[in-house]
Image: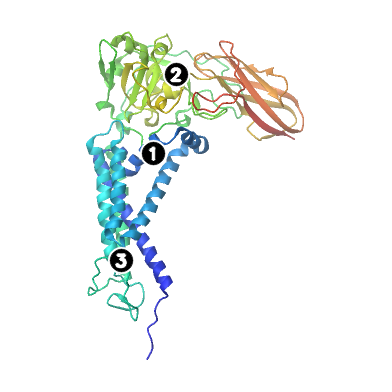
Amino acid sequence: MGSVSTPKPRRNRLVRIAAAAAIGLAAAVAAVGAGELVAVLTGPDTAPVIAVGSAAIDLTPTPLKEFAVRNFGTDDKPVLLGGIQLTMAGLAVLAGLLAVRRRLFGAAVFVLFGGLGVWAALSRPVAGPADALPALAAGAVGAVVVAWLATRLRPARFGPATAGGRPAGHPPDQDADADPEPDRAAPSRRTVLAATGGTVLLGGLAVAGGRTLSDRRYDVSTAREAVRLPAPARSAPPLPPGVRPDTPGLSSFVTPNQEFYRVDTALTLPRIDPRRWALRIHGLVDRPLLISYDELLRYPLEELDHTLSCVSNEIGGPYVGTTRWLGVSLPALLRRAGVRSGADQLVGRSEDGMTIGTPLESVLDGRRALVAVAMNGEVLPVAHGFPCRTVVPGFYGYTSATKWLVDLDVTSFAAYDPYWVERGWDRTGEVRTASRIDVPAPFARVAAGDVAVAGTAWATHRGIAAVELRVDGGPWAEVRLAADAGPDVWRQWSHTWTGARPGTHRLEVRATDGTGSVQTGSRATPFPAGATGWHSTVVTVS
């Protein structure tokens, strides 16, 4: 009489571990799907993964944030979300492993994750009670699903034919400790796989469906395309001929909208219907204002050519661009509101709760500050602040450029610390003098003889008076400046490096601003007040 073979215990254990991990991951997919479906009602930024990611950004130490921007650039947000999803996957696996031993323990992991999501959602500056609902739903669904799948798995047959839910000839499993039901017919492996696979499928459909419905419900593209911009009452003068040297490889003078840098903390772009938007101006003013989008467009509009840069920009970095902005005079709005004595800071608040503080004295000193509604002749893209944002020349974006603007609070530095100041950044944020070599590219190989060198320099609101270049630490030589388009925009330059000899060479550049101050060569990191030092590039002459 033949004997029934028994699977090796080790293999059985590995199979059960894999199955337990799978049910945990399936429950996680179901939980995320539930959260996404509820977020259709409460807003995309309340979805649990997004809420936890936003809280993580707020809690991340400044050096780590700078590391992310420096190493990942504009991909820092996908990297963060990927890390959160991997962490969640690890917790889901743990939940599955615990659930097959004690259903309550596995469910508790999802309850804790849901609680974390609730805390993250309610920690946002503009949060309301309803924002906690997606995380609550995710936690509850995850807990129920992992417990249900664990119930299906625990008596399942993963070996050959069984008796009483165990392989024939195998002693009772002393670890099957939670409410065993030895008399119940054990589900087959196929049944367990079907339950797990079905859960993943339904959860995935919920995730995709929730995000699709959110995109449709909160889509503002039609409303944005319907905006008709009035002609400016004050047009910017045409750019003078020769603002860009004719050097191949040099960046364009005006940065196209699709190439304009974006550095912010928003994991999901705020999508604001201009028909329901209003700008509130309040605080230390005599006449608080509430201005609708249509009313804002009826104000006289002005054009402004302006170079905006990010304080996180490393020496020679890409987070800088020049745009022709269109908007309403910010000083004019403040004068209409009537600024009271004692006010020295203007705090802009975004739809997502971000706060940006600007020295009020600088806003009112005669510079062309705007509440902008368009860039480069196009209604503001959503990624760049639609329906409106602030632009104040002379300052980095973190103290001057509030995107998705909904509120202007006239206050004082003593009374309020904006988001970045709370995290140790310089309170003023005045742009440092900077210069960059664009041509030749780093580590380029060039032919011996005369070599074309070109780049860009900026000192917003002070202008650029001179740019100098040196080779291998030698004497500085003044380069040819392109036409000057004004102190609020960058200035491009070019130079012919004559007699370049074969070998490896180091080129360095420095600029002098309109006040006569020479760019310092002392190296400093972006934190806390902007990077300093001379940009250099290494080339090989052959």
Check disc 2 and report the residue beneath it: 428
Residue 478: x and y, percent? Answer: 67, 16
Q: Secondary structure at mark 2?
A: loop
User: N-terminal of the two: label 3 or label 1?
Assistant: 1
- Above or below residue 66? Residue 167 is below
Give the CA separation, mark 1 to mark 2: 26 Å
What residue is rendered at 43% in x and 11% in y?
A: 367
Check disc 1 and report the residue beneath it: 56
Out of 16 and 268, give the one closest to the viewer: 16
Locate residue 82 relative to residue 215 in the image: left or right: right
Is the C terminus in the top left, top right, bottom left or bottom right quadrant? top right
Amino acid type, label 2 = Thr
Q: Residues within 10 Å of mark 1 (few under 14, many from 20)?
A: some
- Above or below residue 407? Residue 366 is above
Check disc 3 and report the residue beneath it: 153
Residue 15: x and y, percent? Answer: 39, 67
Give the CA separation, mark 3 to mark 1: 35 Å
Give the CA separation, mark 3 to mark 2: 61 Å
- Above or below residue 77? Residue 97 is below
Out of 182 and 324, give the one closest to the viewer: 182
Amino acid type, label 3 = Leu
Q: Secondary structure at mark 3?
A: helix
- Above or below residue 262? Residue 30 is below
Residue 244: x and y, percent? Answer: 57, 21
Is the N terminus in the top left, top right, bottom left or bottom right quadrant? bottom left
User: N-terminal of the two: label 3 or label 2?
Assistant: 3
- Mark on residue 335? none
Out of 128 and 189, give the one closest to the viewer: 128
**Residue 428, image quadrant:** top left
**Residue 404, image quadrant:** top left
* Contact, mark 1 vs mark 2 (Cβ under 8 Å): no
